[in-house]
Image: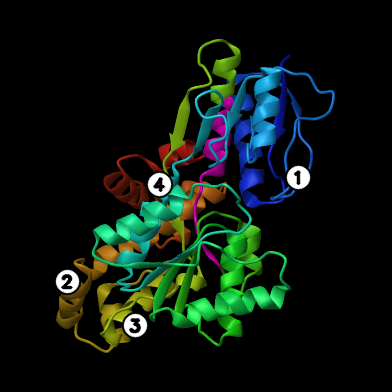
Amino acid sequence: MKNVAVLIETSTGWGSGMVTGISNYLDNSGENWNVFLEPRGKFEPLRLPKGWTGDGVIARVNNADLAEEILQAEIPCVNVSWYDYGQGTIARCTLDEEASGRLAAKYYLEKKYAHFAYCGSPWRPNYDDLFGQAYSQALTSAGYDCHHFPASGIDRELPWIEQLRQLGAWLTELPKPCAVLAIDTQTSRQLIDAAKHAQLGVPETIAVLAGEYDELASGITRPKLSMLDNAAQSVGYHAAQLLDRIMRGEANGGELVAIQPNNVISEKSTDWTVLADERLVRALRFIRDNYYRPIQVADLAQHAGASRRLLEQLFDRHLAITPSRQILLVRLEEAKVLLDRSVLTMSDIAARCGFDSSEVMCRAFQREMQLTPSEYRKRRRGA
């Protein structure tokens, strides 16, 4: 039996997803690890347990002291953080941060925004923010500017209301409507509070997207917070797999496993599409609110107050898509969320997403994703 320490925060959805992914690997591989795991807060400085000796570590290596401890102890380790402490000597398995930034830009561009901004975190000292850089670069490539919250960031020592005033003043100066990406859920929630304090509507004036997934944080936020799916279970699974290989002598500390993001969990904080034609906006909102019903293009046209032919022309002119395909894509996005976040059967998921049957859903899913729903579920959970 190998002794393995898991040093990650347990107070977030990301942390619990990581632990689940590690557990899934142990179930599938038949490995019998003795795992050290204790409750940890998100910004708590992590260290090796005093007096602990073991065979391997999976850790969010978020500070130089922890990296030095691991290197001095000569313990095989897999870093699951976006921090690159020990690069080349401590292996890493993490979500591809640059691909995540590009996915966020793509998400907002598809909503037809013309103004964009990014807000990093004051809680991440010495972090080279490749996520925010990739977001900004993707927008620049598309012909748009990206405003950044000042590099000095928020003074964490200020009272909460003063922090909100700082953020609110920045939000007020942005061109509107503006699509804002924040590095994490805490910063995103603070942005929403700051927008409210500055009397800026969310999402109609300021849309807010978080760069990480935390269902608890989203659920308690009003409006609910949209988030990038950071594939925590998949990262945990592959981190455990990589550590197992290192402990067997089949891999070394120079390895990097980058998990690709492929989903945005859309909620009310980004529930806005910037389009000049109100009829098209009404049609899109009707799809969003009724995708699980047996709706047809004729239903969209009636709700939008346009003929079917005119509505099809509007979709083609502004979105380069047909109304029926938009319905399909919304249903598939919801199916992806349920496949990833639930244990529902294919029939139940199909019914909840508006498909006539599980067979219809599976055919559409495989046509669009090039894999079956079952394969998608296994891949997202790291199996």
Which quadrant of the figure has residue 259?
Answer: top left
Q: Secondary structure at mark 3?
A: helix
Closest to the observer: 90 or 233? Answer: 90
* Labels 1 and 3: the sequence-earlier one: 1
Under mark 4, the amino acid is Glu
Quarter of the image with the N terminus is: top right
Q: CA distance from mark 2 to mark 1?
A: 50 Å
Query: Could one spot residue 223 in this view of the protein?
Result: no
Q: Is residue 161 shown left or right of residue 328?
A: right
Indicate the amino acid at tag 3: Arg
Work out whether 246 lies above or below 135. above
Residue to which mark 4 is pinned: 98
Residue 234 drawn at (x, y percent): 52, 37
Question: For the residue carrying disc 3, how many other residues have a C-alpha within 10 Å: few (<14), some (14-19), or many (20+)?
Answer: some
Above or below 282: residue 105: above
Q: CA distance from mark 2 to mark 4?
A: 31 Å
> What span is in magenta?
225-240
- Numbered mark located on residue 235 in the image: none
The answer to whether one can see residue 61 in this image is yes
The residue singled out by tag 3 in the image is: 282
Residue that numbered label 1 is attached to: 40
Residue labelled with disc 2: 316
Of the two numbered discs 4 and 1 on the same chain, state the one appearing first in sequence.
1
- Residue 212 is situated, as x and y percent measured from the top left of the image, at 54, 54
Q: Earlier in the sequence, mark 2 or mark 4?
A: 4
